[in-house]
Image (cartoon, rainbow, N blue to C red):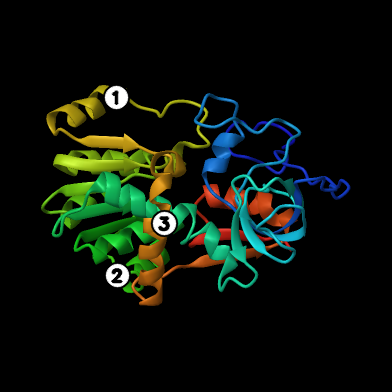
Amino acid sequence: MAERPRGEPTAQTLRLAETPIPQPGKGQMLLRTRYLSLDPYMRGRMSDAPSYAAPVEVGGVMVGGTVAEVVSSDIDGFAVGDLVLSGNGWQDYALSDGTGVTNLGKTPEHPSWALGIMGMPGFTAWAGLTQIGTPKAGETLVVAAATGPVGATVGQIGKLMGLRVIGIAGGPEKCAYAVEELGFDACLDHKTDDLAAQLKQACPAGIDIYFENVGGKVLDAVIPLLNPFARVPVCGLVSQYNATSLPDGPDRMNWLMGNVLRKKLRVQGFIIFDNFGHLYPEFAKAMMAWIKEGKIKYREEIIDGLENAPEAFIGLLRGENFGKRVIRVS
């Protein structure tokens, strides 16, 4: 990281540097990155504002989940040629003592999926919906960023659990995909001027669960439609990540808290492995079965070259991705 961005990251935020390949010592292994995950939370790590995790230091390697190949190993349980789920960050090679590293074996069928549907995004969708959303068949679920790796999974799980699912996405192509391919009951384009009116029409019985990962005008449209005892799992606020000041207009905090009080809403933020890490085996078993049965569909964008990661990340924050965005590093 070359400098801390103010607002949206730019071409100057990150720089590509070349250094010698590190040499592993006793009790270490050398990992070569194959795939790098791009995720909205990374914008928060670029800032030094207080958060749930330490910021990346200026001059430091940008953090990120990776799938890597073991090049050499002095650690039991990790052999040369194994692919592993790790946290190498935005670099070709990294040293590891094995802490927090998961061995995927030598020939996983879809190695990059460990960064998406079978990893943090898929797990976030499953746990947020099932553990905080506590869905009941027949209820109405609204999910923003409906074709992203989290939102698309939330909506499909919702349908499997008997919910009426309304998606919100950016543009007619994404909305058509949510309905025609993912099976959503409806999907609304947040770029339209009458989103609030469309959402009200799409949710005649109100909203029982709102899976929050966007914030902004989508949240403004949802709040008045929430039913008493509605649940709001909060895993992100991507519309606000590049903000440098509070939103324009009147202070809406009292309006929001008034709705929380009067409607007895359950609004709960969560960081997936901090809150629900112990449930990963249960998630993995359920998700793998759904995928094998064709009940869950997954869309992935593969972009080649570590040097293209900064531009791809900026586009991700703008909503240009269509599915899970992954960098194929090598």
Q: Is residue 132 left or right of residue 320?
A: left
Q: Which residue lies furthest to the bottom in this view?
A: 293
Q: How far apart are marks 2 and 3 (CA)?
A: 26 Å
Tell me which label, 3 or 1, sits earlier in the chain. Answer: 1
Q: Name the residue under label 1.
A: 253
Q: In which quarter of the image is the N terminus?
A: top right
Q: Do the residues labelled 2 and 3 touch (CB within 8 Å)?
A: no
Residue 196 appears anywhere in the view:
no
In the image, taking residue 224 as reference, residue 173 lies left or right, namely right
Mark identifier at residue 28: none
Q: Which residue lies furthest to the front in this view?
A: 76
Quarter of the image with the C terminus in it = bottom right
Q: Residue 266: where, in percent of width, then height?
A: 22, 36
Q: Nearer the viewer, residue 42 or 284?
A: 284
- Tell me if residue 143 can be seen: yes
Residue 117, percent from left and from top:
46, 61
N-term-proximal mark, 1 vs 2: 2
User: Disc 1 residue type?
Assistant: Met
Residue labelled with disc 3: 281
**Picture quadrant where residue 236 is located:** top left
2 vs 3, front mark: 3
Amino acid type for the residue under numbered disc 3: Pro
Instruction: Give how far apart the Cα atoms at labels 1 and 2 are.
Output: 35 Å
